[in-house]
Amino acid sequence: HETPDFDPKLKLNEEKVDVMKIYKDKRGDSKEQLHLVVVGHVDAGKSTLLGRLLCELGQVPSRLIHKYQQESKKIGKQSFAYAWVLDETGEERERGITMDVGHSKFETETKSITLLDAPGHKDFIPNMITGATQADVALLVVDATRGEFETGFDSGGQTREHALLLRSLGISQLAVIVNKLDTVDWSKERFDEIVNKMSVFLKQAGFKDNVTFVPCSGLSGENILTKPKEPLSNWYTGPTLVSVIENFKCPERHINKPFRFSINDIFKGTGSGFCVSGHVETGMVSLGDKVLVLPRNETAVIKGLQIDEVSTTNAFAGDHVSLTLSGIDQQNVGIGDIICNPQNPVPVTTRFQAHVVVFAVKIPIMKGLSVIIHQHSLVQPAVITKLVAQLHRHTGEMIKKKPRCLPKNSSAIIEITTQNPVCMELYKDIKELGRIMLRVEGTTIAAGLITKIK
Ligand code: GDP
């Protein structure tokens, strides 16, 4: 299976459309888009840090910040005010204002950043890792507090698992946020200790030397937007959190590839028809387009497009959009389905192969294991039907054909069979749809990239 690279936007019985020209006309001067996921051990301070970041960037009305400060003071937990900022979009959504489930946007000087899997998800804190399947770049937050970094980093902690997950999903741009440095009096020694330990580990996990380490405190706001003051400024002259985000490279948006839209949410719109919100993974879509919903094989017409609650006529790869669909029953659409161009449909299968990294599993993975696969917003029961080969973790060379089992931290090619047909793409064709995670009872046991579709 090969996805053609040529101009995909072939309208039925019409001429080819120059999608790059439309894109340049419409968006030539807009900001670059980046999808960011923030991971780290529970209580590392992710919510506080993100809330603080959104406030400092002016994304949160000051009356709201004030309200949270008052409320948190009342219950004697002043430190919670910033974490609450993230819940606000969830509240708004319940009132039907924001449709953007699990996503929050913010802007820096040059970039428009989508925070993946952030607010609104009840399991935001423990399971932010699901957002990793859609991320371009990642922040890994560690708690600098003595004893806490160690808890997160050593076995049982999530720091290692999260870093491995990012790496196995092909995310190579990473910054480590050494957070809560206020709890160790901004100690350079403590920062260096954490940098050294993490560097060794990240290198083993396959990250290159380009990982940036940023000392900060989400609670005090130090080194987030503005350059730090003393005592941190006595020894740290590196970038702030915001400048690290600014310096991430935006991946190329594949506007010239076939149209693929992954459905994250389905809801009743204001007029006729209904709406689906999700992500344009590749290609573009326009008002009036006839589209195909797979794997259910239903057709529909795009009756409306909204980006950030503003109606528009086109959406491009990288956009998070709400589409109003007509000519289709709401019951025939599901979260995790893919909307595509009928002339260039996404492959549908029940069997595929993936190159995976096995996490710190207690019991080695055997053929026949039942798992839940996560691929963008799709969640689907499946079985590992073949262990094709075990590979060397770093070089990727084959160690053993048809191994009997896969021990923890191993790397392998496996065959997976899903209960129902699913839409799949090879990682090399469309990376956004070519990444999967395998979970058993809420724990990630492996993650990787789709290499073959049967
Ligand atoms: P999450 O589970 O990673 O989202 O962590 P939270 O943001 O909920 O923070 C966990 C706890 O750490 C809360 O009690 C916060 O008030 C506290 N905390 C968060 N950031 C900081 C920080 O920079 N310094 C200190 N001292 N405490 C923090």
Image (cartoon, rainbow, N blue to C red):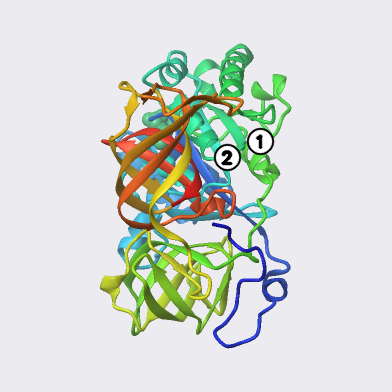
Between disc 1 and disc 2, the foreground one is 2
Q: Is residue 137 above or below residue 272?
A: above
- Residue 303: where, in percent of width, then height? 44, 83
Q: Is mark 2 within 8 Å of ligand 1?
A: no
Residue 6, by quadrant, is bottom right
Residue 353, by quadrant, is top left
Binning the other alpha carbons within 10 Å of mark 2 as few (below 14), some (14 to 19) or many (20 upward) gives some
Q: Is residue 419 left or right of residue 251?
A: left
Answer with mark 1 or mark 2, whichever residue precedes in sequence: 2
Residue drawn at (54%, 57%), measured in percent from left and top? 1
Mark 1–mark 2 CB contact (< 8 Å)? no
Regarding mark 2 in the picture, which secondary structure is present there?
loop
Q: Which residue is mark 2?
A: 171
- Residue 216: where, in percent of width, then height? 58, 29
Q: Is residue 71 above or below residue 76?
A: below
Q: Which residue is mark 1?
A: 240
Residue drawn at (55%, 48%), measured in percent from left and top? 427
Residue drawn at (72%, 71%), measured in percent from left and top? 24
Residue drawn at (60%, 75%), measured in percent from left and top? 9
Measure how far apart labels 1 and 2 are at the Cα level.
Answer: 21 Å
Residue 44 visible, this orientation: no
Q: Given the image, on which type of amino acid does mark 1 rest? A: Thr
Residue 345 visible, this orientation: yes
Regarding mark 1 in the picture, which secondary structure is present there?
loop
- Residue 394: where, in percent of width, then height? 59, 25
